Image: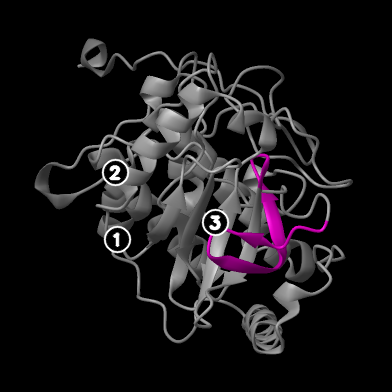
Amino acid sequence: MNHPGADGAHRIGPYALLGRERTVGGSEVFAARTDEGSLVTVTVVAPELAADPEFRDRFRAAVEVARTLSDDFLVPVVDADADAPVPWLATRFTAGLPLRQAVDRHGPLSEPALRVLADGLARALTALHAAGMVHGEVSPDSVLLTMEGPRISAVGRVEATGGPAPSPTDDMFHLGSTVLFAASGIEPDTDALPASLRDVIDGCLYTDPPDRPTAEQLVAYLKHQNLPSLKGSWLPSSVTADMAAATAAVGSESAGGIGRGTFPPPPEFSAVAGVSRRKLIIALAGGAAVLGGTTAAFALFGDSSPAPEGRAGRPGPPHGRPLRRAGGPRRRPPRRRPRRADRNR
């Protein structure tokens, strides 16, 4: 089988590829259809990974676990082939828009939308982590915005031989980085986070992984803030209009049989104009979730693949230079000595 998009190939397994949607972690994502006309999303892994037998074993195992998962914010697996010349994964087609495209084109999300985003991603990761899985690929490119909330695939990044195994705390760092991107756009700025999210998202970005909240704790934190529920659509009308247009375009391609003709190019979107070692404390006793501490410095790095020009890449593990916010570097607040009230009594 020819690698899709490389030399004119436009079928993989039983699916006709309609067009490339995006690239996530080196894998290409396509809209596709069955011979009966049903739409699916097909992810084709990077060719270099296909040559690794151990990768195929891990990919097969991840797919088997993902088939057992059910969560409103996970896109379910419908088919996969780990033994194909180039392994691929088919998931249910979901009408939506990648987060990066939505923010690049329409600007940062509002506070209510950011809360829906953080909650949905945390719920998806809670289901994955409970099954012993790590997503490893939560990013502005992998998160899909839909009318019902954010979605991520039930199968995330599967590492090559010798690569570091991601952990649930890595997922939480990437969740925090993704929400920060949605709040501030290309240049990460923690001041863009609303007050209701600043402490907990900052906590996701702590340098020391054990200090980060779990996905389950993040869900509980947002729930027990007990803020008013969002009325109406969680996304602005400009984003939902783009979603409708993109879905209609895929539908017309499917009806017109474009998958059997010239392979279309990928779409292009223009951008629009702790103290010493801080601890995140989450107390769930008494039905309350409490975060302690003030804002801290943290690090953001892109992955090994180059990001599109003018865009931030997928955040990596928090090591290296500290993030600088608008107006200068974030300084660590001085340690406060305890007050000796009893001495004056």
Give the foreground label among 3 and 1. Answer: 1
Residue 13 counted in the magenta span? yes
Q: Residue at x 59, y 46 (%)?
A: 139
Q: Amino acid at mark 2?
A: Val
State the residue position of label 3. 194
Amino acid at the residue labelled 1: Asp
Does the magenta-highlighted stretch encompass residue 24? yes
* Coordinates of residue 136 in the picture (x, y in percent): 49, 36
Rounded to the nearest angstrom, the CA distance separating label 2 from label 3 is 36 Å
* Residue ID at (44%, 52%): 80
Say which element carries label 1: loop
Image location (x, y in percent) of residue 343: 24, 10
Task: Classify mark 2: helix, strand or loop.
Answer: helix
User: Measuring 43% from the left and 46% from the top, which residue is drawn there?
Assistant: 155
Q: Amino acid at mark 3?
A: Pro
Query: Is the C terminus in the top left, top right, bottom left or bottom right quadrant?
Result: top left
